[in-house]
Image: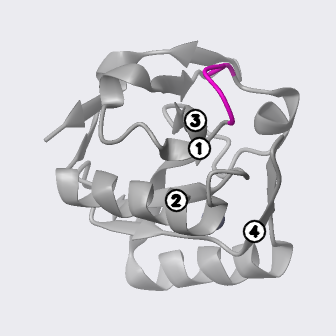
Amino acid sequence: VIRVAQEHVGQSLDMFLACGRRESECVNYWLADQDATDVCQVVHPTHSGSRGGYAVDGGWLNGFFLDLAERGLRAVAQIHTHPGAELRHSWIDDEFVLVPSPNFVSIVVPDFGQGGPHPETWSVQVLTAAGLWVPDPGAVRWM
Ligand SMILES: [Zn+2]
């Protein structure tokens, strides 16, 4: 279970509107200390976005992982927007997972994030050891 403060939820929602401008998908990564479960930082990757998906820049990713290792941080969740009310992972979402290891959390936010801070309307999914995404609203505690 990861714990996320309103402050960080707000940062992601602000970014979704500023970057996605209600017309394209945006993604953020939530970081925690190596052995902790409290989200301590929100990161907005360099990415492209459209109405149907997003792609994170490969060069940016390399630098990101190096930086994480240096700072003793890890990415505990990815959070991205979808155009409408459909919250299931697309095949592209399944194809590109930031950290493909068990217990990594993926959150999908509807309507390009215009709905405000209402996590109960979002989809929280957790990656299992078998590589499957399973809905698990309890995987995130909203503080
Ligand atoms: Zn973005």
Image depth: mark 1 or mark 4 in front: 1
Q: Which residue is mark 1?
A: 112
Secondary structure, mark 3, is helix
Picture residue at 71% right of the left edge, 25% below the top = 89
Picture residue at 44% right of the left edge, 26% below the top = 122
Image depth: mark 4 or mark 2 in front: 2
Please provide percent x and percent y for residue 138.
Answer: 30, 19
Picture residue at 72% right of the left edge, 73% below the top = 61
Whether residue 53 is situated above or below residue 40 in the rendered picture? above
Circle 4 packing at 10 Å, graded few (<14), some (14-19), many (20+), is some
Image depth: mark 3 or mark 4 in front: 3
Picture residue at 50% right of the left edge, 44% below the top = 113
Secondary structure, mark 1, is helix
Q: Which residue is mark 4?
A: 47
From the viewer's perspective, tell me whether residue 129 is left or right of residue 138: right
Residue type for callout 1: Phe
Circle 2 packing at 10 Å, graded few (<14), some (14-19), many (20+), is some
Considering the whole magenta stretch, tell me its main secondary structure.
loop
Question: Closer to the N terminus: mark 1 or mark 4?
Answer: 4
Whether residue 85 is in magenta: the answer is yes
Q: Which mark is residue 111?
A: 3
